[in-house]
Image (tube, helix red, strand yellow):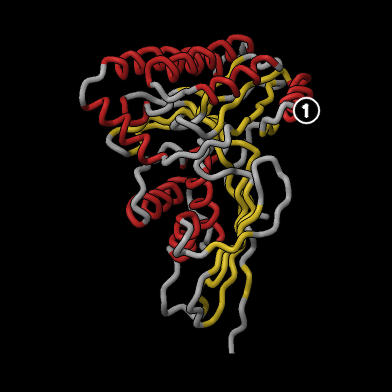
Amino acid sequence: MTNSSTEPPRSAPGRICLAGEDLDWLGGAPIQAALDLRIRCALTLSPRATAFEVRAAGTLTGRARAADVWTTSDRPWAELARIAVTFHHDRGDELWPSGLDIVSEVPPGAGLASSAALCVAALAVSADPASAGERIAEGLVVEKRLAGRDVGPMDYVPCVTGGVVQVACDDGAIRSVDRLAWPDGLAIVVVDTRRTRDTSEVIRWKRARSQAGDPAIATYVRRTTEAVDALSALLVSPAPDITAIGELLDLAQSSLRDDMGVSDEVTDGCIDAVKRHGALGAKITGTGKGGCVFGVFREADAEDAVRRLTAEGFAATRTAVSEAGVLPG
């Protein structure tokens, strides 16, 4: 009889959107950065497995907690993981996925592309190596077609490739990907607002406003595209002005707040705190209406900022751009 086996673990990074939320479907090219906050998956295969169990642990701040046992019936994330790890398996296989251990530094539904990172890590742990394009395409099939979530390819690029990328899309397909550079000496601090939301619901609300001709959406596209273009130019320059990078993040945030309407008192309070403790610039990442914000800091100031924010009760984590996408271990 064939014994159970455990596949070597794989991890994929979460990401922040530096500027350009929603431009992927509004006619622009957002800039995103993969983070050293990862989702790690280890897969157990068993003969004639009839049940699938997800065991998950970890938080954004790295505080340990007992593993939660997720079942596919009561946790959408577990069902997404199940779909991803079985994607490359056939019921006729001698061994079938029976369990998945997840250790996550990325909170779900918080604007850090947790679902894309989970799909990428789960696909990588359950299949042979694939090209970046193949892995992105597989992730979209899993999350959009099989799991029925309203997602596009944008988030999958940094989760697969790592680094800072500018992604242009047409009709849900990637048109171009440009790799940008992240300046030395510029740290990132992520703060979780601790307010979850249904990302798909927020996106539907935005799409409805756009289809109705809301002039605030057009203003958002114009202002944010200007910020994206200026930021892209900085990130390809040989000696980017990090103060100017912060100012562009602030500009992008003002349009998210005033034009897109996805900030609120709690989010504004988190951003104000990050700025008060030395951020050169700060903004929402992702869909908004909850989730995470982030700020960029001079390297020497980041640790002290995290200590002060944590002392004030904020869920703050220092991180960095991950130049790597999928990694073993």
Image quadrant containing the N terminus: bottom right
The residue positioned farthest toward the bottom in the image shown: 1
Q: Please state if 107 lies on the left or on the right of 315 as rendered.
A: left
The mark tally for this picture is: 1
In the foreground, 177 or 138: 138
Q: What residue is shown at x 51% (from left), y 29% (from top)?
A: 285
List x then y, in percent, for residue 87: 43, 63
Q: What residue is shown at x 39% (from left), y 16% (from top)?
A: 225
Q: Quadrant of residue 100?
A: bottom right
List x then y, in percent, for residue 173: 32, 39
Residue 160 in sight from this viewpoint: no
Residue 323 in sight from this viewpoint: yes
The residue positioned farthest toward the left in the image shown: 212
User: Neighbour class for label 1 at 10 Å: few (<14), some, many (≥20)?
Assistant: some
Q: What residue is shown at x 57% (from left), y 69% (from top)?
A: 99
List x then y, in percent, for residue 74: 47, 61
What residue would you read off at disc 1?
A: 307
Image quadrant containing the C terminus: bottom right
> Does residue 80 sit above or below 184 in this rendering?
below
> Does residue 59 sit above or below 277 in this rendering?
below
In the foreground, 233 or 199: 199
Q: Give SS at disc 1.
A: helix
Q: Quadrant of residue 186?
A: top right
List x then y, in percent, for residue 67: 66, 59
> Does residue 228 sit above or below 134 in this rendering?
above
Amino acid type, residue under disc 1 in the picture: Arg
Q: What residue is shown at x 49% (from left), y 42% (from top)?
A: 109
Q: Please state if 83 lies on the left or on the right of 187 as rendered.
A: left
